[in-house]
Image (cartoon, grey):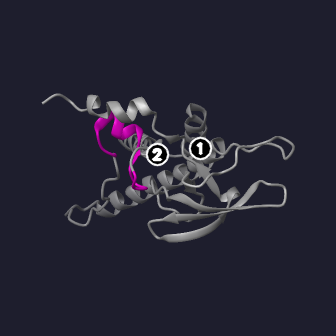
Amino acid sequence: MVRTVKEGLNKILGQAFLNIVELQTVVADISGMINDRPLAKVGAHIKDVVTPSKLFMGRNVGQWPGRFDHLDLKQIKNIKDRWKYRNTILTHYWRRWRTDYLRDQQQRSKWFEKQNNVKIDDIVLLLEDKKNRNDWQMGRVIAIKHSRDGCVRTVTVRTQKGEFVRSIRYLCPIEFAEAPEAMAEDSDSLQPDA
């Protein structure tokens, strides 16, 4: 995880021209993106997942609305240009880090090594290129199709937008398939005392 974050920062911010406030803002936004990734499913609903942000703050960080239309400044064009530049950097970082992170999460090995098959009711991330920042398309496997060699090659995934047939090459398991039993049972202990 640390390696993918650092590599993405080096590649994206290495050539960027940011002042200290913009750099702090970009790093804070990147931190929010990384800490809003799903770690484990904890409930029956597909969106009932634990994220690092939920563990730390009790909620996801999300993103701030980026609008400067209400400002009445002479330099509004410069402010908008800098905001667009910062958003471009964040978008490039998101794409690079998401690709590296998901590649690390996919447990691919050579064809001669046995791999775990996807099972019905597994929660997976759908790999799609045209996704907005911090948009994790998740789904539940509802049907599987075995090939002649007994390996799962294609699955049907149910998401909030419907059911899709996908190759397992375009799926990524979330970090923990289920929250540990102790974590689910002790979830009340994570809440502050009243």
Quarter of the C terminus within the rendering: top left
Q: Amino acid at mark 2?
A: Arg
**Would you say 97 lies left or right of 166 here?**
left
Q: Nearer the viewer, residue 150 or 75?
A: 150
**Is residue 168 on the magenta stretch?**
no
Instruction: Tally the marks.
Output: 2
Of the pair 35 and 141, the residue shown nearer to us: 141
Residue that extends furthest to the left in the rendered view of this protein: 194
The residue at the point 38 percent across, 50 percent down is 48
**Residue 1 got which mark?**
none
Q: Secondary structure at mark 2?
A: loop
Q: Check whether the beta carbons of the residues at disc 1 and disc 2 lie within 8 A of each other.
A: yes
Query: Quarter holding the N terminus?
Result: top right
- Measure the alpha-carbon separation of dots 1 and 2: 10 Å
For residue 101, side relative to residue 184 (left or right): right
* 81 relative position to 113: left or right: left
The relative height of residue 25 versus residue 163 in the rendered view (above or below) is above
Q: What residue sits 58% from the left and 69% below the top?
A: 164
Residue placed at 17% from the left, 28% from the top? 193
Q: Position of residue 96 (x, y in %)?
A: 59, 49
| Residue at the disc numbered 2 | 37
Where residue 101 sits, quadrant-wise, is: top right
The residue wearing badge 1 is 101
Q: Is residue 20 visible?
A: no
Chain-order first, disc 1 or disc 2: 2
Q: Which residues are magenta?
A: 44-60
Q: Nearer the viewer, residue 128 or 66?
A: 128
Does 183 sit above or below residue 173? Answer: above
Q: Position of residue 10 (x, y in %)?
A: 59, 38
